[in-house]
Amino acid sequence: MTCTEFLAQLDDMLDQDAALPLRADLQEHLRECDHCEVTLSTTRKTIEIYRSHELYELPDDLRERLHKAILAKCKKC
Amino acid sequence: MAAYEKLVRQYDRQVFRIAQHIVQNREDAEDVVQDAFLKAYEKLNQFQGNSKFYTWLVRIAVNESLMRLRKRRTGKMVSIDEDVETEEGSMPRDLADWSPDPEALYGQSEMADILRRTIQGLPPGFRVVFVLRDVEGLSTEETAETLGLSIPAVKSRLLRARLQLRERLSRYFKRRNGQAQAQGQDGEK
């Protein structure tokens, strides 16, 4: 398996829905290829970091203001 | 109306986050939240139970967000339909491992700042796929349905978005690691 072929399967690997025989194939490539190993681990970490950080919080005061505005507009419909 | 208020409370944070990610501007995101919930209310009778209310609402919010973005960038096309041809992210270049753990190198707000800057650099068509799929946790099928894209198109954009973000974050982390090491060496002298 080449690195390009591995990369084409990276999403399945990350989403863990690769078929079992394919996974064995991918695992074998990973054992031999440091570059792909790092690509997989750091891409996985990328997703984890984005999931675990709240980048755009909705503050309570703004939230209440938006609710009032939304409901007032809906009532006029 | 009370039932609808419950729905607003249930989904407002997600809609606000998605809108912010697309429009990258808080005032526009506030408008999108209002317009999306109002439109959804007006069209409630068109909502067909064969998709989840949330994905239907997100679809409305994404369309509203893209419209805002187009208005702001008059003359410049903003579309999630066109595939963005870019070499970046097609093959990983920066292959240094991330150790020590980058989250140990930065404070919460500094990391959030880096993450915002990094994701803002992605083309809108990649950004929205990454946000819906990886941040908001929609399935590939739901993301495709929400954006009106094919499943292969979602998969292709998601892969490139993930690789581009990884590459860009790598550059940040490498710089910080280099600084930490240089400081360590200075300290030893």
Image: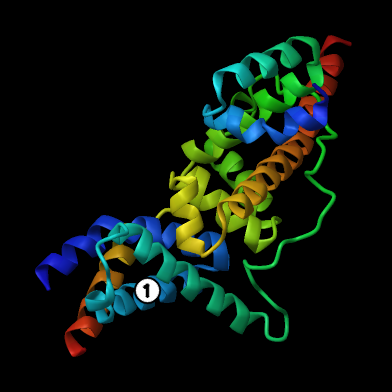
Residue under numbered circle 1: B36
Left or right placement of residue B99 versus residue A32 in this view: left
Name the residue: 51% across, 43% down: B134
Can residue B10 be seen from the camera position used here?
A: yes
Q: Nearer the viewer, residue B87 or B10?
A: B87
- Quarter occupied by the N terminus of chain B: bottom left
State the image quarter where residue B35 is shown: bottom left
- Quarter occupied by the C terminus of chain B: top right
Question: Is B167 situated above or below A24?
Answer: below
Residue extending furthest toward the left? B2
Residue extending furthest toward the right? B189
Instruction: Please state the horizontal and vertical placement of residue A47, each as a whole percent of the image.
Output: 57, 36
The colour scheme used to paint the residues is rainbow
Can residue A59 be seen from the camera position used here?
A: no
Name the residue: 81% across, 32% down: A4
State the image quarter where residue B95 is shown: top right
State the image quarter where residue B187 is shown: top right
- Subunit of label 1: B
